[in-house]
Image (tube, rainbow, N blue to C red):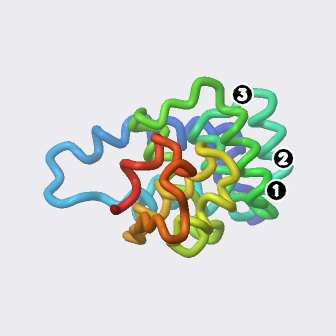
């Protein structure tokens, strides 16, 4: 049948987790750096999600428990909104921004949801330090550096988790 999908949603869930949790193995011995959105395996899974309803992915995430990888994957689903993506990231228990998996997942957020690389816009859209961290991480992957400028944002308004992602 031509209407058959190559994967089930659960296979995509597991496949993305395996790929991102083992990303460091792909990068070993590679000259230069690999871009995770250009990786063939990641691209296949993310392409599948573009036709998969965000509401159904959210049901899987709610049932299985949200992870950084699952929250990122939601951003690629059909009908996803920034509000639903932010809610998924907020539902990740014990989110560790220092974790390579969480960092890579945040970087792989669908660029369609990224604001201009201005700190004020990032903080407003991100709503929370965690949401702003996701956006700054993704902007960094796309070589869009966010400059800190105390004329527009007070230093006290910037959470400590965000400083490593900002250019002063």
In the picture, measured across the screen, residue 44 lies left or right of residue 53, that is left
Name the image quarter holding residue 11: top right
Could you tell me residue 79's position as x and y percent? 81, 63
Q: Quadrant of the C terminus?
A: bottom left
Where 25 falls versus 37 (above or below)? above
Q: Is residue 27 visible?
A: yes
- Disc 2 and disc 3 in contact, CB within 8 angstroms: no
Camera-nearest residue between 51 and 55: 55
Q: Residue at x 46, y 64 (%)?
A: 150
Q: Is residue 18 left or right of residue 51?
A: left
Quadrant of the rendered image containing residue 124 = bottom right
Q: Position of residue 72 (x, y in %)?
A: 61, 49
Please identify, in this view, whether the residue under mark 1 or under mark 3 is nearer the observer.
3
Observer-nearest of 129 and 36: 129
For the point 47% across and 41% down, the residue is: 161
Side of 162 relative to 86 (left or right) = left
Secondary structure found at label 1: loop
User: Which of disc 3 and disc 2 is earlier in sequence?
Assistant: 2
Q: Which mark is residue 56?
A: 2
SS of the residue under disc 2: helix
What SS does tag 3 mark?
loop
Are the residues flagged by discs 2 and 1 in contact, CB closer than 8 Å? yes
Residue assigned mark 3: 65
* Residue of label 1: 53
Quadrant of the image containing the N terminus:
bottom right
Q: Residue at x 72, y 58 (%)?
A: 77
Instruction: Decide: few, some or many residues near mark 1? Use Cα within 10 Å; few <14, some 14-19, many ≥20.
Output: some
Q: Residues within 10 Å of mark 2 (few under 14, many from 20)?
A: some
Q: Residues within 10 Å of mark 3 (few under 14, many from 20)?
A: some
């Amino acid at each position: 049948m031509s209407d058959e999908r190559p994967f089930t949603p659960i296979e995509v869930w597991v496949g993305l987790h395996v790929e991102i949790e083992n990303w460091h193995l792909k990068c070993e011995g590679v000259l230069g750096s690999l871009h995770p959105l250009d990786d063939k395996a990641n691209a296949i899974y993310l392409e599948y999600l573009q036709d998969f309803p965000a509401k159904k992915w959210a049901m899987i995430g709610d049932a299985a428990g949200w992870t950084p990888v699952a929250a990122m994957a939601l951003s690629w689903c059909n009908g996803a909104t920034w509000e639903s993506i932010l809610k998924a990231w907020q539902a990740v228990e014990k989110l560790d921004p220092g974790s390579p998996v969480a960092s890579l997942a945040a970087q792989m957020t669908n660029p369609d949801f990224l604001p201009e690389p201005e700190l004020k816009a990032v903080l407003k859209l991100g709503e929370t330090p965690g949401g702003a961290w996701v956006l700054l991480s993704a902007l960094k992957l796309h070589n869009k550096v966010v400059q800190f400028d105390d004329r527009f944002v007070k230093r006290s308004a910037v959470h400590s988790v965000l400083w490593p992602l900002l250019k002063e």
